[in-house]
Every structure is written in structure tokens, then in C-alpha cells.
Amino acid sequence: MSFGMLVRMPFTPLRHDAPVLGEEAWRPLLGKAKSICETNGLEFRLSHAWPEYAATQALAMERPAGLLACLSEKGFVSWDGLPPNAAREVEQWIEGQQRLLLAEKPADHGFPFNFLETEDGRKALFRQYLDAKAEKDTGYLGSAGRRTAVSPQSVRELASITDRKRGLRLVLWEAAFPREVAGLGTVWKESWLMRRFLSLCQAQVENVLSFNEVLSTACPALAEEVPWFGKSVVAVTAWDADSFRSAARGLPELFGKEILGFTPGASTRIRVSLFLPAPVFSDPAGRLASVLKDSHAPVTIRRNGGSFRFEVPEKSARKKAVLEGRGQETSDGVRMELVIGVKFRLDDLLSSFGSDASEGRAARRGALVEVLSVS
């Protein structure tokens, strides 16, 4: 069983609760859970260690911009939890903010972003918090503090909407992501596309339900850690697909063409352009050849001055890794254009530069990958 301390989140009744932000108080609580699991023959797992929990709780509470700025100014970036130095900074910041962080919050407490709430909503959240403290289950309260009754007709209408959603057919469409979203992850790209689309087509607010970027999820080459932008494929869910089609065709800066008969990951060929700045990326052509050799898909490098190209044998091409490639050395690094298949992992190449995992992640963040086409 996996356990972790509950984070007191904004805009919930628990925001009024005094959090546990001392490791000496945190450990005994987990010890009890671990003991119960082991006594009953269950495996105990901790969802996150103390430094990550403390940082998450602090960021979710009072004036998180101060902690964010503190960590950012010192250059703490990690995909694998807080580095030791960052954990110490979090502890020091919490110690300096104890009076504000550790106290129970009264009804009139000035929470961050309180301009997004109504007075009735604030009162309802505080009332639910008091009921929870008193171990009362009064059910869900509406914004005015009244119990919400659900009529049979409302239940039928909700069921009808759910059935309609299940029957909607996805529309696959070519989308273009700008350089500014490189390295920000799939969810951020989807959110950016939705915000941009609806700002330009406000009539689609009630029509389009979701954009799901499907290329990177099906192709290891564009894993979450790879800083890429450019062309991709999104699956669009909309009540009226024809209405969306009409809107998308009028936005060439966001959308290309509708893609018919496309199965992500089946026989995809992706043309990408890579910029690998010097001196972090030393001889990337040779490194790529080495990575491919280790993957049993060797290539031959043909050099001509500062330019080079890859000769890909038919046997290696069947591995669906690198299918074509060429590049040019410049004064500031190397630019390569590759045609890659669904089995190639760009992350393996980018993170191979560096003497350890930390240096590899830093190198990966310095690269820039543009997707030129998908077929």
C-alpha cells in the first residue's frame, strides 16, 4: 500500500487546517501506517519522501512565489525530486515563515488568489472545515451553504450527456506548437493549444471538449523529457466535429490538415531538426552512431568538411530507429536533420552527453528539437 501525508490544497476546506511541516511530527504518523501494513502482511510504500512533501505543501500554501523565486534563483531544477541543497533551502524557508504557515487559518484569513472566490464560497469552505473537525458528515454544500438536492430528471440528463460523450468520434488533426512550449510537457502543450484556440474562436467554447496530443504518447522519440516543438497530431473531442473542422481550417497558425487513417506508433516517420549547442554536445554525429550501434541499428557516417550524412543500411532501417540523416557543424554547435521511426529514443541520445545522470539531464535541457513533419 502506498501512503503519503495529505497536502492542504488551495480552494478546499483543508486550507484552514494547520499543516504538518516538521519532520519530527511527520515520521511517527507514517510509522503507525507502516506498522499496521506489516502486521497484516501488506507491503508499505511511501509516495514521497519528507523533502518533497514539505516543498509541495509549502508551495500549495501561503505566498509560494517567495519559495519559487528562492529555488529558481539558486538554479534548482530536477525531474527526480529535490536535490539535497534545494531541500535545505525549503527547510530554511519554512522556518522563516512558521508563524504564517503552521497556524490554523481563521475564516477571514487572506488566502492567495482570494479574488477568484465569492464570499458565499469562502463561508461554505470554512463551514465544511469546522464540520470535518467536529466529525460531522453533512454532505456537499452549495455556494450558499444549502444542501443540494439532485432530481431524477437531472440524473437522467447527466446520463444522457454521458452517453453522448461516449458516442463522440475523435477527429485527428495536425497541430503546430511554437518554440515557447519546448520542454514544457504534454499536458502544458495541450493546455496551451486549447487556450490559444478558444481565444481566437470563442464560439467554440461550448463545442470543443478536449485536445489530446497523441504523437508523443505513442512515439518514444518525443518522450516527456525531450524539449521539442513544431508539428504534431492532436485528437480532438467535440460535440460538433464539422463545426470544429470549419474553425480549424481558418487558423493555419495552429492547425494544418485533418489526418485520416493515422494510427500513432504504427508506421510513423518523423522528420526532426536538432540544434545541439557547443561545447556541451561534442561530436553528436559520432555519438548518434554509437547509440545506434548499441541498439543493433548501425549507420555509417560520411563526412565532407563541416557537413556529414548518415548511410542507413536496409537492415538497420527495419529497426525503425534512424531512417535518414544529415547535419552541419556551425560556429555555435551542430544542426542535424533526421528522419526517425517509432523505435528511436531521442532522450537516449541527448542524455548520453555527460559523465553522470545529472549532467545528462542538464545536457538534454540545452538541446532544441523541432518536429518538421509527421507521416
Image: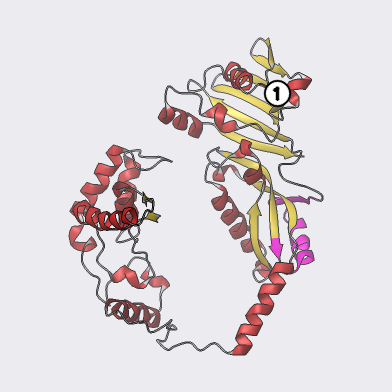
In the displayed structure image, the side of residue 31 where residue 315 appears, left or right:
right
What percent of the width, then of the height, locates residue 108?
Answer: 27, 77
- For label 1, the residue is 325
What amino acid does circle 1 point to? Gly
In the displayed structure image, the side of residue 264 where residue 277 appears, left or right:
left
Vertical relation: 13 (above or below) 297: below
Vertical relation: 136 (above or below) 12: below
Task: Identify which residue, 200 or 231, lies in the foreground.
Answer: 231
Which residue lies most toward the right here?
261
What percent of the width, then of the height, locates residue 72?
Answer: 35, 43
Vertical relation: 372 (above or below) 11: above
Q: Residue at x 74, y 52 (%)?
A: 173
In the displayed structure image, the side of residue 12 where residue 30 appears, left or right:
left
Please, what secondary structure does the residue beneath circle 1 have?
Answer: strand
In the image, is residue 240 part of the stretch drawn in magenta?
A: yes
Quadrant position of the C terminus in the picture: top right
Total numbered labels placed on residues in the image: 1
Q: Residue at x 65, y 84 (%)?
A: 156
Highlighted range, magenta: 237-259
Quadrant position of the N terminus in the picture: bottom left
- The color scheme shown is secondary structure
Task: Identify which residue, 111 or 212, lies in the foreground.
Answer: 212
- Badge 1: few (under 14), some or many (20 or more) residues near its Cα, within 10 Å? many
What percent of the width, then of the height, locates residue 242?
Answer: 79, 65
Task: Identify which residue, 244 or 212, lies in the foreground.
Answer: 212
In the image, is residue 55 part of the stretch drawn in magenta?
A: no
In the displayed structure image, the side of residue 132 where residue 368 appears, left or right:
right
Q: Residue at x 35, y 54 (%)?
A: 56
Q: Residue at x 61, y 32 (%)?
A: 345
For residue 308, what is the image quadrant? top right
